[in-house]
Amino acid sequence: MLEVGVVVVLAVIWLVYLRMTGSGMRMPGRRSATAGPVDRERFMCKIDRSQIEYNGSFVPGLVIKMRGQLRVPHNNCDTDVQAIAFDVTEGQNNAHPVLSILPQWQMEDSPAFCLLAHNGRVPRKISVLANWVTIGSIPCSVLKFPRQGQRQLKFVISLLNRSSEKELLSTATTFPYDNHEAGYIDLRESFQKVEGMMIQLAVAAAMEEQGPSDKGLFAIREWIEKRNQGVSGAPDSREKSVRLLAALDQAVQRAMQEDFDAEAICRSLAQNASIVDRYNTIRLVLRVVAAEGNVDRDQTDQLTRVAELLKIDRDKFRALAQKSLPINTHCIEDIRFLLGITETMPSEEIRRRLNEEYQKWNGRVTHPDQEIRTQADRMLALIAEARNRFVEQSWNVPAAS
Amino acid sequence: MSVIAGIDLGTTFSALAILNSIGKPQIVPNAEGERITPSAVFFDEEDTNVIRVGIEAINSRQLNPERSVRWIKRHMGDRKFKKTIDGKDWTPEEISSLILKKLKQDCSRDEGQINDAVISVPAHFDEVRRKATMDAGRMAGLNVIGIVNEPVAAALHYATACEVTGRVLVYDLGGGTFDVTILDVQNKDINIVCSQGDHALGGIDFDQKILEMFQKAYREKFHAELLVDDEAQAKYEDEAEDLKKTLSRRPSAKKMLYGQAGSMRVEITREQFEEAIAPLIARADMLVEVTLQEAQCNPSDINKILLVGGSTRIPMIHSRLEKKFGKAPEAAVNVDECVALGAAIHAGLIKLREDPSEIDRGVAGGLRDVKLKDVCNHSYGTICAPRDEETGQYVVQNSIILKKNTPLPCESTQRFFTMVDGQTELQVTITQGEDTDPDYVNKIATEIFELPPDRPANRPIKVTYSYDLNQRMHCTFQDEESGRVLEVNFCVGENGEMSEDNVAHKATEMEGFKVE
Ligand SMILES: Nc1ncnc2c1ncn2[C@@H]1O[C@H](COP(=O)(O)OP(=O)(O)OP(=O)(O)O)[C@@H](O)[C@H]1O
Ligand SMILES: [Mg+2]
């Protein structure tokens, strides 16, 4: 569908081109009688901002155009036209690529924006496009910029020899652009910040009196390794692993030196981390706690608080906790934590919750996996004990209407 | 005359009933003249030709607990469990088949050979355990024509023996398992609404609590252990059960404990017992509440509470139920026998449906008005990867297609989509269980469904599961565009490890063992 769109754009270029060769084409050497402030003979480009049709509706877009003199090695030379883009807000020497989220507008080996179109045969060694010719229209939403705010963009348009792929001519234009979205560098930085906070929180969970526990640190390193595997082969993989391990060292140092505010980290994560990473955070913290085997009341209280601050859905958190801290291999001091009940909960609500848990675990007691069966048996015994302890004994429930 | 039988293969006791000439079920007493037979097996050291089953096994147990087996039902379908006797590994199915063989043998002395039989199982038994039970029957030389849920059997007997109308809750607390079933009865029309069960709640768990009280008392007095060996364990398990039964009649009971450190008398009051079993009772309470919720009804909607199983003799069970429901529960039928009696009726109904010509006219007449509408015992689903609403990520998940407690026969269809471009294979997994987390469900079959090549993602696949009256499940996966279909069929538990050939072979092997 999208590819069809590009073909249509190319056909239009060619039609315009033909029309030009027939009438409006001027031969070099002769000055144009209507030459305005622009030098019509120079190869040049411009970007118009307008509403463009895309996927059946009108959206804000950039329309890339060219005109002027085309010099080619021989008559009837077959050519391509290419457009690439940079963000030069921080200077020409510090340019960052503009990215495209759609593959048809990407470079072959990177997501950097690149439009490549067949321009057709240029009839004579020197020909002139007298009018602006549209090379392509790109919806703004497809492009990704390094940072948010007022940007300076530079588009470079080149004419390529189709057979040798050699660049024949090129021209550039620079213009201001207001990017309303967070840029990819912004995102990477905040993402790295988020990862740093995740690690800091995990280290906090691993802290014992003397420092973080070995098992806890091992769990964090494992997590770092696994987080890297997701992008294995990607060029930043090693760099990322080095960065995360450095973040871990830093977090450990911080944790040893000062009493840092875990709650503040949670709040910041709740604000800045994606929902997926909020879940990843609670998973990581659970993993660190699980590495110890014994979980005391302080730890479970903290876990509950962290989940709350990270705005993790209560039922999902309970399911995660039950899975990460299987009762058959972990000793959990406060069983209420595992069952999702609290001291302040009214008896009736505890009853309802325990019934839910009972039903859930009762369905698992015949599982083919012995481990799960044992876990289910232990959970059922735990649930029964909790019911016996925390739910009012009178079974004199008034018959509901 | 063809003999149609129903067998209650219980954790602690088993019973056998047959249909008489007018289609009424009746218990066939065993060779010892008892109407129920302990589900115990003893491999006699002196006489290895004979395996003792029933009261004899119980009596010999304390002499040599190593060579005795009780409560084998709790291990049914467990492939890892085995009891090694004289170098032979006995599976739970084989041991159960010895019990069934004894029942069959004793019946044939008075009533002739049994042609067809139905064996009852707890409602919550999964496919593997059902299949294991069926295999045990076949190994005992029985023609097992079906499996019935114990509370359904109890209800069948109840509805045919008493005049009943309304919504009934069957509270079946036996030796090893607990089931709660809600059903609607209109004369002899029985509609099962839903069933829930707990596989590890029964009389033997109550016995265990008393045993713990014995141990504690002994430890306090002598600072020594009471249960020093298997013999002592076996002896005091029996004593505990005995004391428990006494407490159902009297407010307190006494026992002598003879340990190595000295002897003592221990007295346990009903109150103490009730306190000790409170967590177990809490568990039973939850099962009742969960079942009511599943049936979407309140305690006041229940017209009758029917007690089934020996453990319902505990007075506390009565009083709690009366409190909850505002009416006294009924032991309207014999709590020990009603399951076997109902299983015999169920056998007759199956015969009537499948082979009406083979059934005697009198028997057919007696069953004519009985109508049973049963439900699907479990939820069945498939593994898929929908997008999580909250996180937007794809998560692998079990999606239920056929819901537990849907009236039989039933069918349900859902539509899924292929995930990637050019997908030519779909791994289809059939699951059993209620969980959405695939780690917690039982994957009962996995097949590869081949799809046409060169297609984009998101091609619709229609998945249909159906469950028939004979408890046979049928699954089809259809690629809507090409019309290509993959069918998966299996009978209750046919995914069990044992093939039909194997069972036949085992049956021959088991013929060689004499039971008494
Ligand atoms: N008077 C009594 N008081 C308490 N418990 C009793 C009494 N009589 C029998 N029981 C208990 O009932 C249990 C046996 O009941 P039942 O025969 O219904 O169970 P089952 O069919 O063997 O087991 P299941 O149905 O769970 O497989 C035993 O645990 C026994 O101790
Ligand atoms: Mg029973």
Image (spheres, coloured by chain):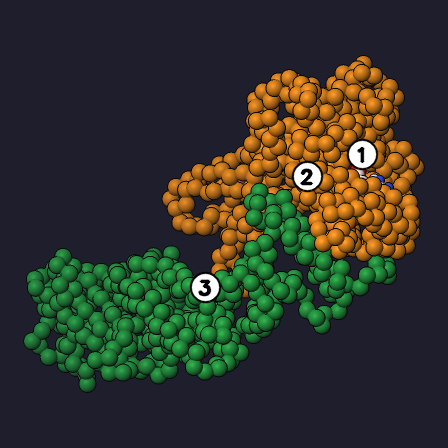
Chain colours: A green, B orange
On whether ligand 2 comes within 8 Å of the CB at mark 1, the answer is yes
Mark 1 — residue?
B339
**Mark 2, mark 3: which one is toward the viewer?**
2
Mark 2 — residue?
B230
Disc 3/disc 1 C-alpha distance (Å): 54 Å
How many C-alpha atoms fall within 10 Å of the one at disc 3: few (<14), some, or many (≥20)? some
Closer to the chain start, of discs 2 and 1, is 2
Mark 3 — residue?
A215
Q: Which image quarter holds the N terminus of chain A?
A: bottom left
Question: Does B478 sit left or right of B452 as displayed?
Answer: right
On whether ligand 1 comes within 8 Å of the CB at mark 2, the answer is no
Q: Amino acid at mark 1?
A: Val
Q: Residue at x 73, y 47 (%)?
A: B261
Q: Amino acid at mark 3?
A: Lys
Q: Is residue A244 above or below residue B304?
A: below
Locate residue B256, reporting x and y percent: 82, 44
